[in-house]
Amino acid sequence: MRRRFLAVFLGLCVSVTAQTHVSAKAGAQTKQSPALPPKLVLAIVVDQFRYDYLTRFRTEFTGGLKRLLDQGAVFTNANYDAAPTVTAVGHSTFLTGAMPAMSGIVGNTWWDRTTAKSVTSVSDDTTKLVGGNGNGSSPARLLVSTVGDELKISGKGGKIIGISLKDRSAILPAGHMADGAYWFDGQSGNFVSSTYYFAGLPAWVRDYNAGHPADKYAGVDWLGHKMPAVGPQLYNAVDASPFGDELLQALAIRALSAENLGAGPKTDLLAVSYSSVDYVGHREGPDSPEMHDMVRRVDRLIGALIDAAEARAGRGKVLVAFTADHGSASLPEVNQKRKMPGGRLAWSTYRAAVEKALNEKFGAGQWISFSADGVIYFSPNPIPGKKLDMTEIQKVAADTIRAQPHIGRVYTRSQIEQGAVGRDPVDTRVRNGFNPARGPDIFTVTDPYYIFNATGTTHGSPYGYDTHVPVIFLGSAQIRAGSYAGTVGVEDIAPTLATLLAIETPSGNMGRVLTEMLK
């Protein structure tokens, strides 16, 4: 009996040892054979695309949005964690993981205290427009790196290209080391670029422009909106129609073949931002028949773009990241019919009240260097020869605005710099949106659904209807498809992409890796 037991015991030991050896060997082989990197990263933004468009219109999708929802990793509670929620902030956050506090992109436009002038997020007087007339644009004001930059630095990156109707939407996702960024010029009807990238447009872009692609929309009717005759009037109107996105789609698909994207030895990145949804949204609002039609059309465009990318790189070799740069508020008139709060405010009234209060408190002065809806930059020397306390000036202004109707909160530069800000979501988003060198002296948050617009609608607030956007990943074997209900931020896209690409995380990253979707 003892001999039989010993034999069985020794046999089991040999079996376990062999299995352990095989398992260890298999594990070693797994570690030595990581998932192949994608041939192409397709980074897609739809400007002013509220998350609820995905739920409201899902049954009507037949193209790219359907595929993303059915086959992708879908984050249902993704928000921007910074305000203002505007185009430049959204597009800069997308592939940097950096919010304005770190990226320096505090808005579409702000006051540059160094040069004492208004600047845009991509304005650059040292460059010239290529393919058009005037000054060019560049990513020089972006203080951090992008996923594309890190791809290049790693040696794993091929070509990096950005395309949109707007300069900031083409430039900011593509980053500093991009091979090109292209946007639509409303004067010439051409897609243009900047001497930051090259002295002249590539031949394939010149060939595209030579066909005058926008001219074919002259006189075309879309839901009662008739396009003007050929010329600058048409070129400036085509943005606020589905035809603007059709133009940039054609250029993006041409870029795939002309630049051989997805077919080279390294990983390429194409960032495409569909802008026409935003232009239509501002004019018509998110509840309009026009917006309904725009969402269905962009679904088909995204599907065709993904198909074209996979035709170049191969199915399973295209990594797609999809989001929006912000949402939007409903038209105040629509909300009022619903018995919901909301209304229109005139910022000029609030600004005038501030100037009156400052004059009464300190004496007549030139108080404001720059002001836009809800934002004030004070003059450094409003009353020459009189020593004034800027903290006190900010306090008087903030108290004055708070006393006006439909104001939720007012933040001062001193208050944010001293950390005297609460920690609820609104406070956090305002703090993340403040950059010490570029941020304003006054930042105003209206009550929900109140906007500083006489017509149409807008965005920019720290409220859910402006911050809640889609975040969806598709195409990598490392991604576990499904619906994820946890709270995430748009700043989480960049570090997650960096992990999937096995490159360094962008320099200003403030997000986290979305490990819950990774196999």
Image (tube, helix red, strand yellow):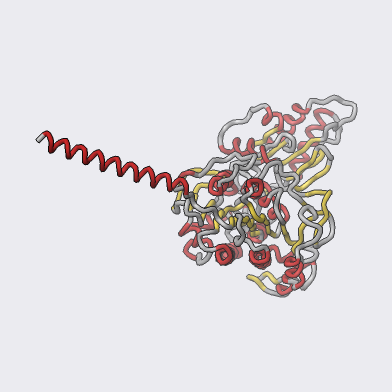
Does 237 sit above or below residue 26? below
Residue 58 in the figure: left or right of residue 20: right
Q: Position of residue 195 (x, y in %)?
A: 80, 55
Closer-to-camera residue (293/514): 514
Does 32 sit above or below residue 247? above
Closer-to-camera residue (41/14): 14
Q: Position of residue 134 (x, y in %)?
A: 84, 57
At 82% from the left edge and 28% from the top edge, which residue is drawn? 362
At 73% from the left edge and 61% from the top edge, which residue is drawn? 184
Viewport quadrant of the N terminus? top left
At 83% from the left edge and 49% from the top edge, which residue is drawn? 126
Q: Position of residue 233 (x, y in %)?
A: 78, 67
Is residue 39 something that shows in the picture? Answer: yes
Q: Position of residue 288 (x, y in %)?
A: 59, 62
Closer-to-camera residue (477/2): 2
Does 451 sit above or below residue 69? above
Q: How many marks?
A: 0
Residue 116 in the figure: left or right of residue 494: right
At 76% from the left edge and 40% from the top edge, which residue is drawn? 351
Is residue 328 something that shows in the picture? Answer: no
